[in-house]
Amino acid sequence: MHDDLDRKIIHGLYCAPRTSFRRLGEVIGVSEQTVARRYNALRRDGVLRVVGLSSPTAHGRADWIARLRCRPDAAGPVADSLARRPEVGYASVASGGSEIICTIRSTAGTGRDDVLLRQLPKATSILDMNVDLLIHPFTAPGTAGWAGGKRSLTDDQVRQLTEQRPAPTGPPPAPTDEDRPLFEALAQDGRASHTHLAQATGWSAARVARRLEALEATGTLTYGIDILTERLGYELNAILWLQVDLPELHRIGEELARHDECAFVSATSGRHNLMAVVICEDTPAFYHYLSGRLAGIEGLRGYEISVRARRLKQSVSLIHHGRLVHPALG
């Protein structure tokens, strides 16, 4: 079982994905060697992956959330097939075994030009589908996702890790063709050393460092942190589909993003205009969250719950034999 130090390291990587082990150790209060050993164990065991990604907005693309109702005998094969498609991010089968939930990266706007979104309604195994645009993600200060059930670092530690991070000043430009080997290497390991990235690109290490800094500053290069939450002792994963009054949408979205149980919160274009991915240790903890913090939010008009039964893909990593792996290895 992983402990609080692992969670602090994960939280630190959410705040600063490429920070050095030395810097992370200084902030947490342990040695550089301890951080390196713990991180390498998490990565080797398939519990954690840090990956570099090209921002979808740099390509004029957006994320859609799809709920597919399938014949029970076909849900597994359909979900496995979807998870292996590069434009599909998160993918899981909900409890009951006939609902697949996944994110699809497609053209912003109607999404009608996307091949997958055209093909899905024609599949005989899919009985019904609903696809909504993820309009606006809400992120709590000091984190970019779920960091082990609680924000293990103090506000001051978060500030130390993020104070020199540049804030993009405009829409991110698309990467160039020359950047392709760099992004391919970062998709394998977002924390790859400058030396390794220099070998992958044929550039000098100094040029790699300059290009990384420029891509991060414009927002063209972002980072994803994939973790297997159940390996950290958090077994229950559910998506809440919420209905809120439009004037309350932003307030409630920001409030949910501050909840330790919420891994991801976004406004959507659907009848349920807010969704939240909730992660808890077990069913009693989930009920405590629903009847406590969630019930205390004013302005909720209705909700549905999809409890995950089987997860196939987390952001960009496949789940293979209980480990996070690069899609090419799954």
Image (cartoon, rainbow, N blue to C red):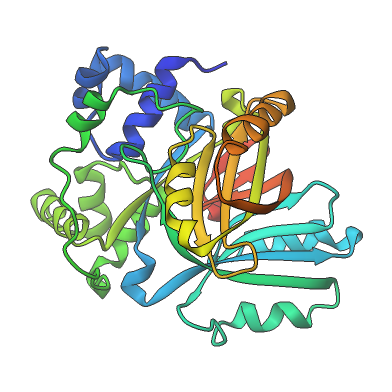
Say which residue appears at 62% left-offset and 30% top-offset.
Answer: 292
Occupied quadrant, residue 221: bottom left
Rendered image quadrant of residue 22:
top left
Q: Residue furthest bottom?
A: 113
**Is residue 282 among the parts visible in the rendering?**
yes
Instruction: Residue at 40% x, 30% y: name it.
Output: 10
Asked if residue 247 is positioned above or below residue 324 in the image, the reply reads: below
Asked if residue 205 is positioned above or below residue 284 in the image, the reply reads below
Query: At which x and y percent is residue 326?
Result: 51, 49
In which quadrant of the rendered image does the N terminus lie? Answer: top right
Give the number of marks.
0
Q: Is residue 66 left or right of residue 176?
A: right
Asked whether, in this view, residue 99 is left or right of residue 192, the answer is right
Residue 153 image position (x, y, % from top left) = 33, 23
**Can residue 182 be seen from the camera position used here?**
no
Q: Residue at x 64, y 71 (%)?
A: 131
Q: Residue reaching furthest top?
A: 30
Residue toward you, 179 or 262: 262
Position in image of residue 262 (x %, y %): 52, 39
Residue at point 55% right, 70% down? Answer: 269
Q: Is residue 209 left or right of residue 288?
A: left
Picture coordinates of residue 31, whole percent (x, y): 25, 13
Q: Does 31 sit above or below residue 203?
A: above
